[in-house]
Image (tube, helix red, strand yellow):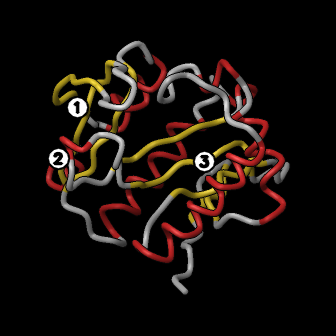
Amino acid sequence: MVSVATLETGRLILRCWRDDDLDALAAVNADPEVMRYIMDGSVRTRDESAEALAKMRRDWREQGFGLFAVELRDSGELAGWAGLAVPAFLPEVLPAVEIGWRLARRFWGHGYATEAATAALRFGFADPGLDRIISIRHENNLRSARVMEKLGIGYAFSTTVPSNQQPVAVHAITRHQYESH
């Protein structure tokens, strides 16, 4: 079994997933505003969130990287997730590794997504030693666009997700760009 790295920032702990994270994850995935720009915008059921949690654990074992649970250091609350995944939903970008994040709405606007993604991006270039990391957002998701900009992940091109015809913007950063950022 591959151990999940634990990353710490000033306000956050990025850690492995635990069984008791399911309630908080299910609440995040059941919020229509959080899910607005995710795939077709549908909320997820508790069972779908349980399947997602199992997949996140499996990805770490199979790939040596994945999505971290993002916890607030001061309260221990699960804010959501951030980390790396293979974006199989967009075959035209493969092979690729994507950085992404999803936080409960009450944690928006505090810089947590940028803080967590900064740590995950550093991890992606250092630990699995990736040479390029992409990030994909719905074209209307301006919050994620701002996080990408802060991380130095530049716009590459626009396309459409085949399964749901949603318009997305693909952003990318190379190791060289990251090291010079």
Q: Looking at this view, name the residue that lies furthest to the front.
A: 163
How would you rate the neighbour count of disc 3 (Cα within 10 Å): few for under 14, some for 14-19, many for 20 or more? many
Mark 2 vs 1: CB contact within 8 A: yes
Which residue bears the numbered disc 3? 81
Quadrant, the C terminus: top left
Which mark, residue 177? 2
Mark earlier in primary sequence (2, 1): 1
Foreground pick, 111 / 84: 84
* Amino acid found under the numbered disc labelled 2: Gln
Q: Image quarter for residue 102?
A: top right
Determine whether the residue tagged by mark 2 lies in a helix, strand or loop.
helix
Residue displayed at 36% across by 61% down: 124
Q: Amino acid at mark 1?
A: Gly
- Label 2, residues with CA under 10 Å away: few <14, some 14-19, many ≥20: some
Residue 85 point in image, percent of width and height:
41, 54
Query: Residue at left 39%, top 47%?
Result: 99
The alpha-carbon separation of the residues under discs 2 and 1 comes to 10 Å
Q: Is residue 93 left or right of residue 24?
A: left
Q: Is residue 158 left or right of residue 38?
A: left
Q: Residues within 10 Å of mark 1 (few under 14, many from 20)?
A: some
Q: Is residue 143 left or right of residue 55?
A: left
